[in-house]
Amino acid sequence: MNILILSAGTRNKVVQAFKTALHGKGKVIATDCSNLAPALYDADGYYLVPRITAPDYIDRILDICVKENITALFSLIDPELSLIAKERDRFTQIGVTPVVSDYDLVETCFNKYRFYKLMKKKKIPTGKCYTDMYRFLEDLDHAKILYPVFVKPVTGSASININKVKSDDELAVLFANYEDLMIQEYMDGQEYGADVYVDLISKKCVSIFLKKKIKMRAGETDKSVSVKIPALFEQIKALTEDLGFCGMIDIDIFEIDGKYYFSEINPRFGGGYPHAYACGVDFPALLVRNLEGLENKQDIGHYAENICMMKYNEVCIRDFDGKEIIP
């Protein structure tokens, strides 16, 4: 059984966790478009590939799957999720399982305004969103929303180009200079992150790890503490099963006045997953069991509380010995 991790980047911990889960059963192969992606060098083997926008990108990944006898693959970056989901049949035809939710659901999660409308349709609390600046200003005049707000790309990721806006003038400048923007209500409450696994066979949510976010950096959780909130576990389980997710999921939630607001769902490993793994919540092991044809039993909240994660910098030093450096 060999696992292919696409766009591995700096996610060394994920690569290491899969090597542990596969010990004696197979290999972990990683890809990236840059040879300065440190996670490549923790894998059992790696390939440098074109950017995901290249016309021959999927053909290249398919070639790797055949050459390495890959059992399953998944991506660690948002823009690639839709691509893999859209090409699902090409992978399954050669015996490879793409660990990704359905295309329409992935697209909805990547498009923050579509996600907002889905939450409203499902009557799930979420922050107000606008793509029409004038509609926002009208609601502002009627005190239906207040400054500050966040202005972000509708299809952004990794907190790129997100701006906290406090006035009409700032808002007008952003909308005059950028396209495809949305306005999102600023949720001034405690933020939580949930790492979730939905079984590939039973389609049931079988594992949830919940952390209170203490500090963020570059869109990822930098410091957090493990917590258990049974009522929130139930909400997460019901929502993920209802929407039809599968595999690894990352969810951002805000608590405001005792009510939980679902801000984002990313159908992939979250940047804070190493916290869950260190607490014994082992998604790679769950995935391996599924790939062996075995269902996983529900095991939600089976971890210790008050365990803190504190990220810190590490470096990978490698001699390229005259080889081209691809940034």
Image (cartoon, rainbow, N blue to C red):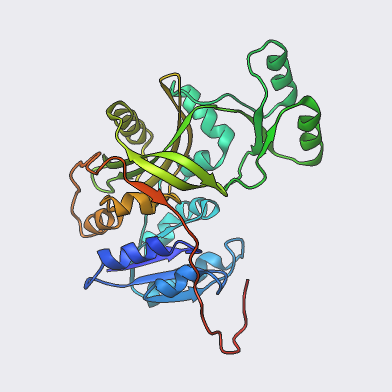
Residue pictured at 58% horizontal, 24% vertical: 128
102, above or below 121, in the image: below
Q: Quadrant of residue 230?
A: top left
Nearest the viewer among 78 and 69 is 78
Nearest the viewer among 24 and 278 is 278
Residue 289 location in percent, x, y?
21, 56
Horizontally, residue 127 falls left or right of residue 305, namely right
Query: Which quadrant, please, contains the C terminus?
Result: bottom right
Query: Which quadrant, please, contains the N terminus?
Result: bottom left
Nearest the viewer among 281 and 134 is 281
Q: How many numbered discs?
A: 0
Residue pictured at 46% horizontal, 72% vertical: 40
- The answer to whether one can see residue 84 in this image is yes
Nearest the viewer among 133 and 145 is 145
Residue 317 location in percent, x, y?
51, 77
Residue 139 location in percent, x, y?
68, 15
